[in-house]
Image (spheres, helix red, strand yellow):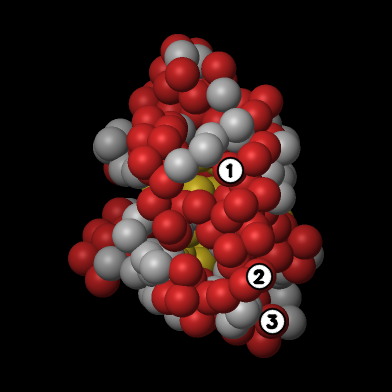
């Protein structure tokens, strides 16, 4: 029986590469490719049958105003995907742990050779086991600074986390408000609340802190 899989990444070269690799994996059939969060959610909503596996990046810069965690939560909660595989270059242990808590079945690092990892991942998940690629497994074992601050970061709402990530990436409050379809005042409140929870008093501290976590 064929394993029905969809793949999603905003980089065309990555999508092409994944299709080429998966074409060589026995019993796997790639039935959909998406290049944005919006396209991914539309694809899932129109499909009558559940996918066996969705292999997707964690972040999309275009096509959805959802926070990355919120997008993953929507995918998991949709019931349209049996197993979610995240293919990412994220190196923040806290972020990776939260993805597992959201119900992601497999974490694959773009720093590992996916050609060597994908079959092992599919096999593990078919046996109801979570699977981590070697680089991600080593990151989680190292713990380090990310886990030191995990309790503070865990206090943030998904929207607060989304706002500070966008702010640290260089967007102004007005640009964040436009992207999220919220008022500037609402965005400012989210930013203020996040800084209070993190015990941060100025923007320089905020940028330095968030960049140190590599969110």
Residue denoted by label 2: 186
Q: Where residue 45 is drawn, which disc sits there?
A: 3
- Label 2: element kind: helix
Residue at the spot 77% in from the left edge and 61% down from the top edge: 77
Position of residue 53 relative to residue 31, above or below, is above
Residue placed most toward the observer, 106 or 175: 175
Residue 108: quadrant of the picture: top left
Residue 180: quadrant of the picture: bottom right
| Whole-percent x, y for residue 183 in the image | 61, 79
Q: Earlier in the sequence, mark 3 or mark 1?
A: 3
Apparent side of residue 195 relative to residue 9 in the rendered image (left or right): right
Residue placed most toward the observer, 172 or 120: 172
Residue placed most toward the observer, 78 or 32: 78
| Whole-percent x, y for residue 153 in the image | 62, 35
Residue at the spot 47% in from the left edge and 52% down from the top edge: 165
Q: CA distance from mark 3 to mark 1?
A: 36 Å
| Whole-percent x, y for residue 213 in the image | 43, 32
Which quarter of the rendered picture does the C terminus lie within? top left
Position of residue 151 relative to residue 184, above or below, is above
Q: CA distance from mark 3 to mark 2?
A: 30 Å
| Whole-percent x, y for residue 146 in the image | 50, 24
Position of residue 40 relative to residue 114, above or below, is below
Q: Nearer the viewer, mark 3 or mark 1?
A: 1
Apparent side of residue 14 relative to residue 59 in the rendered image (left or right): left
Q: Is residue 111 visible?
A: yes
Q: CA distance from mark 1 to mark 2?
A: 14 Å
Circle count: 3
- Label 3: element kind: helix
Residue placed most toward the observer, 17 or 75: 75
Q: Earlier in the sequence, mark 3 or mark 2?
A: 3
Which quarter of the rendered picture does the N terminus lie within? bottom right
Q: Where residue 195 is drawn, which disc sits there?
A: 1
């Amino acid at each position: 029986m064929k394993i029905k899989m969809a793949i999603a990444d905003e980089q065309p070269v990555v999508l092409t590469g994944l299709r080429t690799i998966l074409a060589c994996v026995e019993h796997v059939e790639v039935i959909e490719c998406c290049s944005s969060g919006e396209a991914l959610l539309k694809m899932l909503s129109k499909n009558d049958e559940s996918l066996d596996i969705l292999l997707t990046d964690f972040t999309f810069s275009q096509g959805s105003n959802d926070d990355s965690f919120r997008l993953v939560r929507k995918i998991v909660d949709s019931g349209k995907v049996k197993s979610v595989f995240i293919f990412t270059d994220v190196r923040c242990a806290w972020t990776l742990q939260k993805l597992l808590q959201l119900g992601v079945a497999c974490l694959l690092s773009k720093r590992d050779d996916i050609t060597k990892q994908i079959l092992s991942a599919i096999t593990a998940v078919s046996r109801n086991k979570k699977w981590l690629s070697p680089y991600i497994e080593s990151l989680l074992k190292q713990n380090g600074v990310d886990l030191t601050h995990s309790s503070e970061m865990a206090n943030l709402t998904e929207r607060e986390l989304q706002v500070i990530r966008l702010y640290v990436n260089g967007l102004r409050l007005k640009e964040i408000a436009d992207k999220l379809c919220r008022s500037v005042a609402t965005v400012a409140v989210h930013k203020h609340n996040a800084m209070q929870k993190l015990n941060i008093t100025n923007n320089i501290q905020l940028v330095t802190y968030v960049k140190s976590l590599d969110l």
